[in-house]
Image (spheres, rainbow, N blue to C red):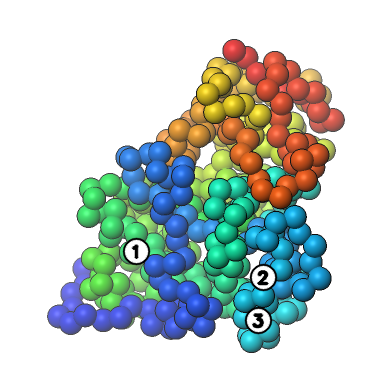
Amino acid sequence: MFLTLNRRVSPMADAVAHLSEFNLSIDSILTTDSAKARKDARRVFAMHYATPARGLATACDTGAVATTKPRGYLASVAALADRHGMRAAVASHNGCKFSTAGCRAGCLAFSGHGGLSVDVASCRARRTLARLADPVLYARAVLLASCRELARARSLALPLALRLNGTDETPWHRLRFDVSTADAIAIRSRYGIDVEIGESLSIREALAGRQHWVTGLNPDVSFYEYLKAPLGGPDGLRAWRAAGWDITASFAADRVTACPDAIAAARAGFRVAIPVAIAKNQPIPSRVVISSGGESVSLQAVDGDTSDARFLDGCHAVILRAKRSRGADPVAASRFILPNQSRVDLASGSVAFCA
């Protein structure tokens, strides 16, 4: 549907106003300058970073004991939660319901600037608060921010890659909202982007069309995530894939079902990301064999640190070099990362790295 407008209109003013209640704006909810994004000049990456696991409750707890300031109490965030009467919602929030103890200890949310800057941690917490306060309005805001980044990508003659769960596992595939004709007109006027008009749309459906993203409104957009979710269930790997997202299953070495889960995911056509203690200048293995209970899969290995464009990979093992998570308990974090050796035996099976 082609829409025209002769005057400039402010799109989705309700969503923009909602952001301002949490000291946010359209240009502060997606990140486009992450270290990994800068490694791939073939596309524009836009990522949404929020507070992981139960970190929001910690950020609002004056008695929280933390090893670094970004992992602890954040006074400005607590004040914002109080202002909006959100203490109960904060206390019950879990941004990573499928995480393990090792994953939470070694979380990438606290690597790089996220592990050093209270400002970064506070911004991520404000995003999380804004989504909790009104998921529909916040999803509309993320759509608007995504249109802004798509317009920027097109100005550079590049495709856009959107990853909305940079540091948590929000069920974006189930967050739905309406897009009116007035919304679509305003977005096209501001950004030159066509969006789907209709009721109960996901962000992917609104931006890429109800059909698969390759044949939708904006075929130059890819939606992708890494998830520790199981195969089944409303938030499982299959549900996300059915909703149009490209999904990489994350291997959690400290989960009692790590190996059989990875085998099942690979056989269902998902690639598997595996964090390994490999130094930056060391080569990755050529293949990975995951075994459990007489079953096994052999996967070609790819270097997951050269680019985050996982949707270009096949059903491979994605090797991710372990990153420093500031303030992490080294013992707990080490259980999540596989050592760099030819074979690693786990409670649920084994992982063999082939040179």
> Considering depth in this image, is 20 or 204 the residue closer to the camera?
20
Q: Residue at x 26, y 67 (%)?
A: 191
Where residue 63 appears, as percent x and y from the top left, is 81, 71
Q: What element carries label 2?
A: loop
Whether the residues at callouts 1 and 2 have beta carbons within 8 Å, the answer is: no
Is label 1 or label 3 in front?
3
The residue to which callout 1 is attached is 147
- Mark 1 and mark 2 lie on one chain; the one further toward the N terminus is 2
The vertical placement of 246 against 131, above or below, is: above
> Considering depth in this image, is 266 or 348 the residue closer to the camera?
348
| Residue 272 in view (yes/no) | no
The vertical placement of 272 against 228, above or below, is: above
> Considering depth in this image, is 337 or 132 the residue closer to the camera?
337
Q: Residue at x 54, y 44 (%)?
A: 247
The residue to which callout 2 is attached is 74
Q: Which residue is drawn at 35% across and 71% down?
A: 197
On-image quarter of the N terminus = bottom left
- Mark 2 and mark 3 lie on one chain; the one further toward the N terminus is 2
Q: How far apart are marks 2 and 3 (CA)?
A: 9 Å
**In this rendering, would 338 be left or right of 115?**
right
User: Furthest residue to the left?
Assistant: 6
The label number, if any, that marks residue 56 in the structure image = none
Q: Is mark 1 on a helix, strand or loop?
A: helix
| Residue 335 in view (yes/no) | yes
Q: Is mark 3 on a helix, strand or loop?
A: helix
Tag 1: amino acid? Cys
The residue to which callout 3 is attached is 79
The vertical placement of 39 against 71, above or below, is: above
